[in-house]
Image: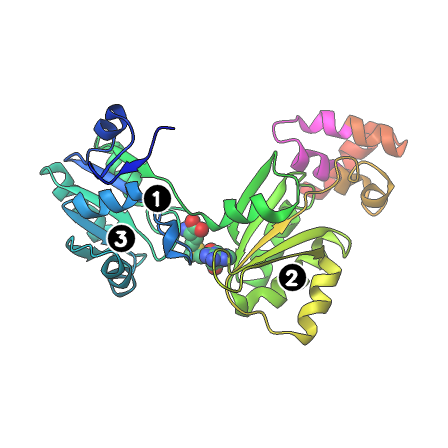
Amino acid sequence: MNGIITPETNRIGTSEETEKNRVTPRTLYLVATPIGNLSDLSPRALKVLNEVSFIAAEDTRNSANLLQCFGIHTPLISYHEHNRKARGEEILRKLKEGASCALITDAGTPAISDPGEDLVVLCAEEGIPVIGIPGCCAAVTALSVSGLPTGKFVFEGFLPTQKAQKAERLEKLKYEERTVLLYEAPHRLKSTLQSLRDAFGPDRRIALCRELTKRNEETLRMTLGEAVSRYESAEPRGEYVIVLEGCPADAWREGSVQSSLSPEEYVQAILDKNPGMKRLEAVKKAAKEYGIPRGDLYDSIMKKEN
Ligand code: SAM
């Protein structure tokens, strides 16, 4: 097997891989760090963190602890939500001058519900190579153990915290057939589960993946109704990923969903479900299914809009 570390060389893998793993100047490395279990930091990540000119970290105190555990003494600067504009420019300047930089966040993969996206854009615009050093990502780890369909999924990250915006977002997900991945803070878990149940019904299956890779790791597989009941009497503790089953493929067409919608709402549902579909086509379809003249339905929609 390729990709082994030999004590003699302290190198990883074949000579081609050794060459590929060389840390190069003028390069930004996005290094994934553990989401709880320090053993998940890869040998390649360690090598990069040791050899880059400097490390940009979301929280320098937090990352200093991690680096100390591995005996890494690379200079550290902060790069977070509130200084990303000025600090991003500064990092870019250093990269252009020939430095190499590793970006890390508090846990997991940078730029995934974490700082990094803007810096990648800056570098891409200026022709600075950006290299991903893959590793932990809570969302993908949760999906893989969820027991729900993994073939197609959509990552939603954190839902908005404002009630109206949250409801609007959930409305958009109503007919989403792919498995949905959500991050949530423990103090918001209860209310988010309630919102999910209200939006998708109590029977929709979920997996609650808690404290992944840590001592108290657990994956709870249940329905939304059961999850809400569970947390009526228990306090959520630790970090959670919510993995939500998608809408059954035919549910939105058949009785349950359609019958609760007016023909006008049904047209909108068809359009939400089929981005790019022409409105007239959706009107034809809805009119046929409701057994009403398509002209009347079209007029009614236009009247409501004006
Ligand atoms: N960039 C990170 C990644 O790649 O997973 C995600 C960062 S985001 C700010 C933090 C959220 O990820 C937490 O609120 C939680 O939803 C999820 N998370 C992080 N670590 C986790 C863990 N060990 N178990 C479950 N969820 C976790």
Q: Who's the residue at 54% across and 60% down the image? A: 217
Is 221 within the magenta? no
Q: Which disc is residue 84 wearing?
A: 3
Looking at the rendered structure, the secondary structure element under dot 1 is helix
Q: Who's the residue at 26% across and 40% down the image? A: 29
Taking depth in this image into account, of 246 and 34 the one nearest to the observer is: 34
Q: Position of residue 83 (x, y in %)?
A: 25, 57
Q: Position of residue 258 (x, y in %)?
A: 82, 41
Identify which amino acid the numbered label 2 is placed on. Leu
**Mark 2 and mark 3: Cα distance apart in space:** 32 Å
Whichever of callouts 1 and 3 sits on the residue coming sooner in the sequence is: 3
Taking depth in this image into account, of 222 and 46 the one nearest to the observer is: 46
Residue 92 is left or right of residue 113, and the answer is: left
Tell me the crowding category of disc 3: few under 14, some 14 to 19, or many 20 or more residues within 10 angstroms, Cα based. some
Give the quadrant of residue 194: bottom right
Give the quadrant of residue 151: top right
Q: Who's the residue at 37% across and 53% down the image? A: 39
Residue 9 is left or right of residue 190, and the answer is: left
Asked whether residue 160 appears in the rendered view, the answer is no
Is 276 within the magenta? yes
Residue 282 is left or right of residue 66, and the answer is: right
Quarter of the rendering occupied by the C terminus: top right
Report the magenta residues as a range.
267-283
Residue where numbered disc 2 is placed = 193
Whichever of callouts 2 and 3 sits on the residue coming sooner in the sequence is: 3
